Amino acid sequence: MRILFVAGGTSGVIFSIVPLAQTARIAGHEVFVAGPENVMETVTSAGLPGVPVTSRGMLESLLDSEGHPIPIPSDLRERYIFNGRCFGRYASWCLPRLLDLADRWRPDLVVGGALAFAAPLVAAHAGVPYVKHAVDMGEPHTIDLAAAAELAPWLERLGLHEMPGADLFVDTCPPSLRVADAPSAQPMRYIPYAAQRRVEPWMYVRGERPRVLLSAGSRVTPDRDFDILSGLVGKMAGLDAELLVAAPEAVAEKLGPLPEHVRVGWIPLDVVAPTCDLVVNHAGGNTVLGSMAHGVPQVLIPYLPYVVDYTERLCAYGAAKLVRPEDDSAENITRACQEVLESASYRERAADVAREMAAMPLPAQVVGALEDLGRKQR
């Protein structure tokens, strides 16, 4: 079977779909992963065949036709619409080459990340099933509606009256943390994936002090979100703990001299998480789910509005502590970290989540569901 995986526009969302794509390939299926040119290294370094379908990066969707930044709304609902429009705009750039790929390669199945809105249109064009793959614990439905509105010209061109629905939804959110009205889904165990580096002893052997990992995500650059990461490093420098700051190497160099108890650089979460007592992060999907999979409690600061919902769900469950972005002072963050480190309840609830995730079907079992879907199509 030929399976076309359609990735979103950044490495973070590609990390989410890599385990299923790798497993499908190991099972003997032909697999292509389509995405923008600037993430092809992420795809191919995972041992997957990458197909570039646009030279434009996701961040360009934040600019108008003259290259000027589009004002970002402050109202939460308007921000959802803004985000959806951006994702739809990015999808429209991918579609010409994706449709050509579908005509030439003729996939039997299309799997798309939840925010890869070109995927259902390519599947409809090819006349094959579409599988929606979660990239975190869920996005507001308003984003989907706004993306569909942005893609209206493409829908008309393809003879579609609305965005095609998924024939199967692969969800990595543990059942107890799903929203009450969540769509029916094929559950799948979340397998943490990240670009790797050489393993050193400090990564798997902890010291005497509590170990805290700080991350603002893999998308931080010296020009984007650097102020968030550098600000958090400064606010947490006084915490009585060993602090690991996970950041791309180009970003790490810009953080400058740091205290002895702070280690900074590219730190694969799946390698280091088993030694951590706490993960402090921006509530990005992979960081949150990866920490959950290893049973590590978290302090979450949801700087992006569409991650607030699942942040609140995890905090209400008792496995994390929420610090709202407007309250992210050094005092508040330190207090939150101390509360989580000193309270056994957070560790216990985080361990409960990890056990639930470990019991979910593995990607190999989900490949079987993809095979069943492909056979029905024939």
Image: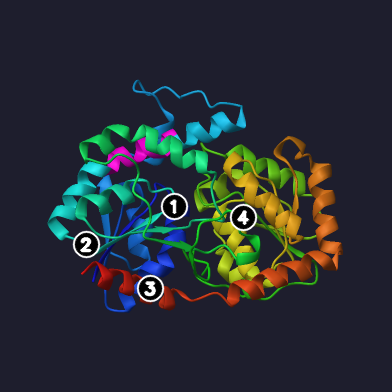
Q: Nearer the viewer, residue 134 or 372?
A: 372
| Quarter the N terminus occupies | bottom left
Q: CA distance from mark 3 to mark 1?
A: 18 Å
Q: Residue at x 38, y 38 (%)?
A: 148
Judge from the rendering whether residue 191 lies leftward or rightward of residue 1; answer left or right: right
- Seen at 57% across and 39% down, the residue is 225
Which callout, 4 or 1, points to the residue nearer the camera?
4
Which label is found at residue 369? 3
User: CB under 8 Å between callouts 3 and 1?
Assistant: no
- Badge number at residue 137: none
**What residue is disc 4 on?**
179
The mark nearer the N terminus, 3 or 1, is: 1
* Marks 3 and 2, the one that precedes in the sequence: 2
| Magenta region | 85-94
Work out how far the residue at label 4 is from the one at label 1, CA to CA, in angstroms.
Answer: 16 Å
Q: Of marks 1 and 2, which one's residue comes earlier in the chain?
A: 2
Residue 131 versus residue 64 in the image, above or below:
below
Please name the residue that numbered disc 1 is placed on.
114
**Crowding near pointer 2: few (<14 within 10 Å), some, many (20+)?**
many
- Is 228 in front, or is 263? 228
